[in-house]
Image (tube, grey):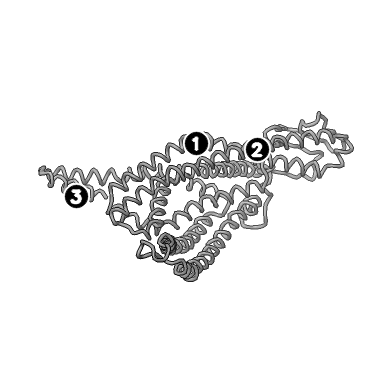
């Protein structure tokens, strides 16, 4: 790219009659070679969610044996590339056939009319029947089969990651590879979320990251047509793409606050739902104790408070999501589409494309804009991804703390001892309850009682 820029500069100087010293030209080429790669890297990080995808991989990788997720990801990428690129290539032919059918409908007219090439309705019915039998049905069958293969392989990948969290992480093996050691379930019990919630987060993390890559691979065959547009009408492409990019950034900036608020409410709803599940499970298991203590009204008040909070947050979320989706659909329909249609009109006028290519090149421009604006257009999706990554990082930290506590637990038995001695015993439940005993000795043959108010940590 840098060499091309250098040659272009020298050619331009020759046309203008400017004598460009060879030394200056070489310096320009060297500057381009040095400057272009860092600039391209910086621009890529700004346009594409490379950082988020990397964080998603690292967040899920810790729940599997070293190297397992990397190998599984490469296998899935190979399958997805072959499936989606192949389907994308078939999709280009399908779009052209569909556009020809639509164009044929516009040529249907009354018999003996002014248009000499008017198509009769019977001829169009035959054309439509051939389209369905020879184009639509084969494409449908191929896509269903290939998409099912792709979905099956991703299902295996997703199940492996979920199993890694549920089984291998919470019930780790010993260092020698022997039987399971003590579980790390304390890492979950110390949080406001359940195992299901954390499992859902790891599945959502890999699903969101995979879907971003999957759709871009499907659009590759259409994007391959973009260089032809750039060569034939470079000024048009350079005007359309930057204009849409600027417009999209303005929309994303104006909606960023609403997007962040939506993700915060989603996180709060997840925590409230997990907390309610724990409370209901606890009260159901201990219903006899609640009945004996005549504490039913306390349980009822707690259940009601959680239900009211959850309903309130759910209604707020629904209203915000409705506004967000309405703005997105209005923007795509009334702002982006007219700009793309203007570009297609110029391509038709200049003879670069035919009427049968309208639908294809509309998708080409749409996919090119979507590729360049994947970060801003996926703002809500990436915010959701960050929420799940944060949960997995919190769980990993809690599991590390649990492992550290397990390593500190030592029990020495002396058959001749006359009592029980405890040192540095600690207990915690969430952030609200923490008890620590520095040292205590209990003599054999005596009775002891632990006293204190409710909730103190007895």
How far across and down, in percent of the image, does residue 70 sit? Answer: 50, 56
Of badges 3 and 1, nearer the viewer stands: 1
Image x and y of residue 35, in percent:
28, 43
Query: Is residue 89 something one can see in this rendering?
Result: no
Q: Position of residue 348 (x, y in %)?
A: 32, 54
At label 3, counting other C-alpha atoms closer than 10 Å, the crowd grade (few under 14, some 14-19, many 20 or more) is some
- How far apart, in angstroms, are the residues tagged by discs 3 and 1? 43 Å
Seen at 36% across and 47% down, the residue is 342
Would you say residue 195 is visible in this rendering? Answer: yes
Cα separation between marks 1 and 2:
19 Å
Query: Within the image, what quadrant is residue 412 found in?
Result: top right
Using a 10 Å C-alpha cutoff, classify the residue at mark 2 as few (fewer than 14 neighbours), some (14 to 19) or many (20 or more): few
Given residues 203 and 163, the one toward you in this image is: 203
Task: Indicate the secondary structure of the residue bearing disc 1.
Answer: helix
Q: How far from the left and from the top, in percent, is residue 442? A: 81, 35
Q: At x 26% / y 47%, what residue is drawn?
A: 33
Residue 315 circle label: 2
Helix, strand or loop at label 2? It is helix
Q: Is residue 33 left or right of residue 329?
A: left
Q: Pick out the residue farthest to the right.
A: 292
Answer above or below: position of 134 versus 63.
below
Please say if the residues under marks 3 and 2 sit with CB atoms less than 8 Å apart.
Answer: no
Task: For the C terminus, give its image quadrant.
Answer: top right
For disc 1, the marked residue is 255
The answer to whether residue 28 is above or below residue 352 is above
Residue that badge 3 annotates: 7
User: Answer yes or no: do the residues labelled 1 and 2 have beta carbons within 8 Å?
Assistant: no
Q: Which quadrant of the view contains residue 285?
A: top right
92 horizontally vs 411: left or right: left
In front here: 304 or 280?
304
Q: CA distance from mark 3 to mark 2?
A: 61 Å
């Amino acid at each position: 790219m840098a060499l091309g820029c250098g040659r272009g500069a020298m050619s331009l100087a020759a046309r203008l009659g400017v004598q460009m010293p060879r030394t200056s030209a070489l310096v320009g080429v060297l500057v381009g070679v040095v400057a272009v790669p860092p600039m391209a890297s910086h621009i890529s990080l700004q346009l594409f969610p490379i950082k988020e995808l990397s964080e998603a991989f690292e967040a899920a990788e810790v729940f599997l044996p070293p190297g397992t997720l990397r190998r599984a990801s490469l296998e899935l990428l190979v399958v997805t590339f072959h499936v989606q690129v192949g389907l994308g290539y078939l999709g280009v032919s399908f779009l052209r056939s569909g556009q020809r059918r639509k164009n044929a409908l516009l040529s249907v007219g009354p018999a003996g009319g002014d248009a000499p090439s008017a198509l009769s309705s019977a001829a169009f019915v035959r054309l439509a029947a051939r389209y369905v039998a020879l184009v639509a049905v084969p494409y449908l069958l191929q896509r269903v089969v290939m998409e099912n293969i792709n979905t099956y392989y991703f299902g295996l990948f997703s199940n492996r990651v979920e199993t890694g969290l549920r089984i291998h992480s919470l019930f780790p093996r010993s260092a020698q590879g022997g039987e399971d050691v003590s579980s790390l379930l304390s890492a979950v019990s110390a949080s406001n979320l359940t195992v299901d919630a954390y499992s859902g987060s790891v599945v959502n993390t890999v699903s969101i990251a995979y879907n971003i890559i999957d759709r871009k691979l499907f659009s590759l065959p259409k994007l391959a047509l973009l260089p032809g547009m750039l060569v034939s009408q470079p000024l048009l492409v350079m005007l359309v793409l930057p204009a849409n990019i600027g417009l999209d950034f303005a929309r994303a900036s104006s909606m960023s606050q609403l997007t962040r608020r939506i993700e915060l409410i989603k996180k709060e709803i997840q925590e409230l739902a997990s907390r309610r599940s724990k409370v209901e499970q606890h009260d159901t298991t201990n219903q006899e104790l609640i009945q004996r203590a005549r504490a039913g009204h306390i349980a009822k008040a707690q259940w009601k408070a959680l239900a009211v909070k959850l309903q309130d947050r759910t209604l707020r979320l629904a209203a915000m999501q409705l506004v967000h989706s309405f703005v997105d659909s209005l923007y795509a329909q009334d702002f982006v589409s007219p700009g793309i249609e203007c570009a297609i009109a110029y391509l038709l006028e200049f003879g670069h494309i035919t009427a049968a290519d309208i639908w294809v090149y509309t998708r080409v421009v749409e996919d090119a804009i979507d590729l360049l604006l994947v970060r801003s257009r996926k703002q809500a999706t990436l915010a959701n991804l960050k929420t799940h990554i944060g949960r997995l990082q919190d769980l990993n930290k809690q599991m590390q703390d649990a492992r550290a506590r397990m390593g500190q637990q030592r029990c020495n038995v002396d058959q001749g001892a006359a009592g029980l001695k405890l040192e540095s015993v600690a207990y915690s439940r969430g952030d609200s309850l923490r008890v620590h005993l520095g040292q205590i000795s209990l003599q054999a043959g005596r009775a002891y009682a632990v006293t204190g108010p409710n909730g103190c940590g007895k």
